[in-house]
Image: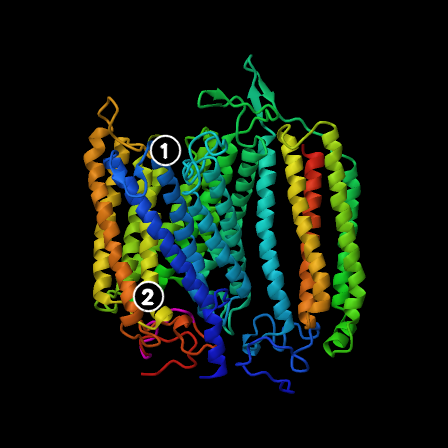
């Protein structure tokens, strides 16, 4: 391992940077040159940790944009089907849309999800706290990881509570006799909560993965990226839930 | 050899490699397999129309529903696995990083995962031929209730489920690719490569990736809803009171009254951007190749960028022109009709720009015209021929007659299939030196071009007349009814079948050329076409871009072309 600070362009493969890489702190956001349009100072080859973080955030952003389109398709269908109806034997147009009252436990679930967004944001910020990050980068222990882990675990627990609450809401509807296939808008209630729930399950899997990654990944930049992307995904699922919840509660 | 080179070669050979060039070539091979199968299916269709009693190999005598299965699988294979995979995933993986001066894509592992998911999707789709009931029969568009009821027809049970699973996987893989492409273009451009210095191929991949992100997410939602209708007894798409095969559909637990119109809206909201996904990379390539072979810059680079963006945006707003006769609100039909005519404006702008390039470059063009240039001109020809019937079909009142006739078949085969195919041929002939270090055989290429051009026009142009005469699509045979209307079209259809067989045979020249040139082709230099774009640069590690992408004969005192990353233009 070269004990220098310069890196040749040929040295592209990822290695344990040790002392040779750049610390992933915000003082030099573009990893050594000008940002914006100061192209002359933009380093070639291996970019700084900020670029790496931006790249992963961009990828996540595009993935979530596609996901948003998926939910928009379901919401679009939701609005279209509100005009669902049939002609009865006397040629009257009878609506098939029977708005259902949202089980009150969903309000508690919403609060739980918002709280979990708060906890994961605290975890994320611990990972970017400059003093802790510098200590980790210098190899002096893992204070940022130590501080962030309990908050991540808390988020996972709150996520599981949310999902349990959703399940209870389903049980409550089923005890009233409203199943998935009962009528048009019960389709949508179950479908919307189920797809959001599946995304949340993926989020919890990502949280568990992030917790493992915090202890298994050797580079502090990658630890930051894992937690950061998980946090943004979690926040987005929270925002989606707010829209979907308002939709189900007030727009039936 | 150096450790670096050894490691690069090992990385490229592994089965699960993340090397973008290997993945690109594998995508192209996947598309080649899909196009071969799709072509064989289309030949079976053509032969069946003119001789319905003939026993075909592997299928025996095809019953009418078997014909519909051929139609469905032909459409699915060609639209998804050839026209979406090859120009977008295949060539973008191969060429995109080099054209923006990057060493690799933003997420190489995602690229590999997307490739293997696409392969899995193809395997699942082809599996539909082998399950009881066979392949689905509802067309690549799969309108309910035919597609939503498992008992509605042969192949609509397991075959249809396999189709839905396959396309679901394909949607997911495409979205992963699009994420990869977008992040690469936004964040991995080399020093000096501003957005307005990118080659037009890269712009087209940018817009295409955004369209994929929007359109395939909607298709995924539609597939989920259809699977739910089929297996979870919901009623998103199926009206109550449906009578299937004489039996009233008993959906005792779910008299939820669905509507096929919901599927049509969701599907065509995907389906129209899909055709722009298929054709935008071809347009970008055409601009690049015309510049290269006329030795002049692109006519109005910013104009071309603007038209690409406009086509992308408008393409999201015109889906209803597939639904004029579906019972949609006629005022909505008017709106979609106007939008569709509006999208002809940027498209015509591009065509006029290309014609201007040809006019301006008539003195300086490469002589004799190499095969990639011939195929680019072929693309232009088919794009104009197919595009001119677009505004015709965009009028609801004309579409009321022409919908579901062979006129529509002629339109989209000319503008999407043939133009897309010719552009893919141009891309293969042009970038073959990058894949293998050799040039493809010129004479064989020219024969391939001329035979294909003649065969394609002979096959698809007469379909306009069949459509104007009123011949509907998807009819398995033209004889056997008491009226003479359909059988009077038999001579025309026989001619089309003969031309189709001729066209398919001409592609054997291409396959032979590929196989021969990969081993025995003339070794190309590092830049055989004397191009300016970065994929032809010999060394990208110190790349710093200081000029636009198409500086051919830009200034009279400089040499014929200036590479985009050259430090100083060579003085003559």
Quarter-of-image position of residue B444: bottom left
Left or right of residue B295: residue B126: right
Residue at 63%, 35% in the rendered image:
A188
Region rendered in magenta: B548-558
Left or right of residue B326: residue A210: right
Residue A44, position as x, y percentages in the image: 54, 77
Task: Write down the residue under mark 1.
Answer: B65
Residue at 23%, 47% in the rendered image:
B501
**By what rule are the colours in the image chosen?**
rainbow
Name above or below for residue B339 compared with residue A36. above
Say whether mark 2 and mark 1 are on the same chain.
Answer: yes
Residue A2, position as x, y percentages in the image: 62, 86
Find residue B219 and name its label: none
Residue B330, position as x, y percentages in the image: 45, 30
Task: Write down the residue under mark 2.
Answer: B430
In the rendered structure, which disc, 1 or 2, sits on the residue that comes first in sequence? Answer: 1
Task: State how far apart marks 1 and 2 are (Cα).
Answer: 42 Å
State the SS at label 2: helix
Q: Chain of mark 2?
A: B
Work out whether residue B436 can be spotted: yes
Name above or below for residue A133 compared with residue A158. below
Indicate yes or no whether the magenta region holds residue B499: no
Name above or below for residue B567 compared with residue B250. below
B357 and B108: which is toward the camera:
B108
Indicate yes or no whether the magenta region holds residue B551: yes
């Amino acid at each position: 391992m070269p004990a220098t600070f310069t890196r040749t362009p040929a040295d592209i493969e990822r290695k344990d940077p040790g002392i040779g890489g750049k610390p992933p702190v915000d003082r030099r956001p573009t990893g050594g040159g000008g940002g914006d349009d100061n192209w002359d100072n933009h380093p070639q080859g291996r970019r700084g940790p900020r670029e790496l973080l931006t790249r992963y955030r961009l990828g996540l952003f595009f993935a979530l944009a596609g996901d948003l389109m998926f939910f928009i398709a379901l919401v679009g269908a939701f609005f279209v089907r509100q005009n669902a109806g049939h002609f009865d034997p006397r040629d009257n147009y009878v609506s098939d849309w029977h708005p259902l009252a949202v089980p009150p436990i969903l309000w508690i679930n919403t609060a739980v999800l918002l709280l979990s967004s708060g906890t994961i944001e605290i975890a994320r910020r611990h990972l970017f706290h400059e003093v802790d990050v510098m200590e980790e980068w210098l190899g002096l222990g893992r204070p940022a990881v130590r501080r962030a882990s309990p908050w991540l675990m808390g988020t996972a627990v709150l996520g599981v509570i949310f999902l349990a609450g959703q399940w209870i809401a389903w049980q409550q509807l089923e005890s009233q006799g409203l199943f998935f296939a009962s009528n048009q808008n019960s389709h949508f209630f179950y479908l919307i909560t189920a797809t959001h729930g599946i995304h949340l399950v993926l989020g919890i899997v990502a949280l568990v993965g992030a917790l493992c990654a915090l202890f298994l990944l050797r580079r502090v930049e990658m630890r930051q990226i894992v937690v950061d992307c998980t946090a943004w995904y979690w926040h987005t699922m929270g925002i989606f839930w707010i829209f979907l919840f308002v939709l189900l509660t007030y727009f039936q | 050899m150096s450790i670096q080179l050894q490691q690069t070669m090992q990385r490229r050979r592994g089965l699960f490699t993340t090397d973008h060039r290997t993945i690109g070539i594998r995508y192209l091979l996947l598309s080649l397999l899909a196009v071969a199968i799709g072509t064989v299916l289309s030949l079976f269709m053509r032969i069946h129309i003119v001789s319905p009693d003939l026993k075909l190999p592997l299928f025996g005598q095809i019953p009418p529903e078997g014909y519909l299965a051929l139609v469905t699988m032909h459409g699915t294979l060609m639209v998804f696995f050839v026209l979406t995979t090859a120009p977008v995933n295949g060539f973008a993986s191969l060429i995109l990083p080099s054209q923006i001066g990057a060493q690799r894509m933003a997420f190489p592992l995602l690229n590999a995962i997307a490739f293997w998911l696409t392969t899995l999707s193809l395997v699942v789709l082809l599996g539909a031929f082998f399950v009881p009931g066979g392949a689905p029969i509802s067309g690549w568009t799969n309108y309910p209730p035919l597609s939503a009821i498992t008992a509605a027809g042969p192949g609509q049970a397991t075959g249809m489920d396999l189709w839905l699973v396959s396309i679901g996987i394909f949607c997911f893989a495409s979205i992963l690719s699009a994420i990869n492409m977008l992040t690469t273009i936004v964040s991995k451009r080399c020093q000096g490569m501003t957005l307005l210095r990118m080659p037009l191929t890269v712009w087209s991949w940018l817009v295409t990736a955004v369209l994929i992100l929007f359109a395939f997410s909607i298709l995924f939602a539609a597939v989920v809803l259809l699977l739910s209708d089929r297996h979870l007894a919901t009623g998103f798409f199926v009206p109550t009171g449906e009578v299937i095969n004489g039996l009233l559909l008993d959906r005792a637990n779910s008299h939820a009254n669905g509507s096929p119109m919901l599927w049509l809206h969701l599907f065509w909201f995907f389906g129209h951007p899909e055709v722009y996904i298929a054709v935008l990379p071809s347009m970008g390539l055409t601009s690049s190749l015309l510049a290269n072979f006329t030795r002049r810059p692109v006519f109005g680079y910013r104009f071309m960028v603007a038209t690409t963006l406009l086509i992308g945006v408008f393409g999201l707003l015109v889906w209803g022109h597939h639904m004029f006769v579906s019972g949609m609100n006629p005022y909505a039909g008017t709106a979609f009709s106007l939008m569709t005519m509006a999208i002809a404006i940027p498209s015509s702008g591009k065509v006029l720009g290309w014609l201007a390039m040809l006019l301006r470059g008539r003195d300086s063009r490469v002589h004799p015209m190499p095969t990639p240039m011939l195929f680019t001109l072929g693309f232009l020809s088919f794009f104009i021929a197919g595009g001119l019937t677009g505004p015709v079909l965009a009028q609801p009142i004309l579409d009321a007659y022409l919908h579901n006739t062979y006129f529509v078949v002629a339109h989209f085969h000319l503008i999407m299939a043939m133009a897309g195919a010719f552009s893919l041929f141009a891309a293969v002939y042009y970038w073959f030196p990058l894949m293998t270090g050799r040039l493809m055989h010129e004479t064989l290429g020219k024969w391939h071009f001329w035979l294909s051009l003649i065969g394609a026009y002979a096959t698809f142009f007469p379909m306009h007349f069949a459509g104007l005469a009123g011949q509907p699509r998807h009819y398995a045979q033209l004889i056997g009814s008491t009226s003479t209307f359909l059988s009077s079209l038999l001579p025309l259809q026989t001619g089309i079948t003969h031309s189709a067989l001729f066209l398919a045979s001409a592609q054997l020249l291409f396959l032979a050329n590929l196989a021969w040139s990969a081993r025995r082709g003339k070794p190309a230099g590092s830049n055989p076409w004397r191009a300016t774009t970065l994929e032809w640069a010999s060394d990208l590690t110190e790349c710093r871009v200081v000029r636009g992408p198409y500086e051919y004969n830009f200034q009279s005192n400089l040499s014929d072309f200036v590479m985009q990353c050259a430090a100083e233009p060579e003085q003559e």
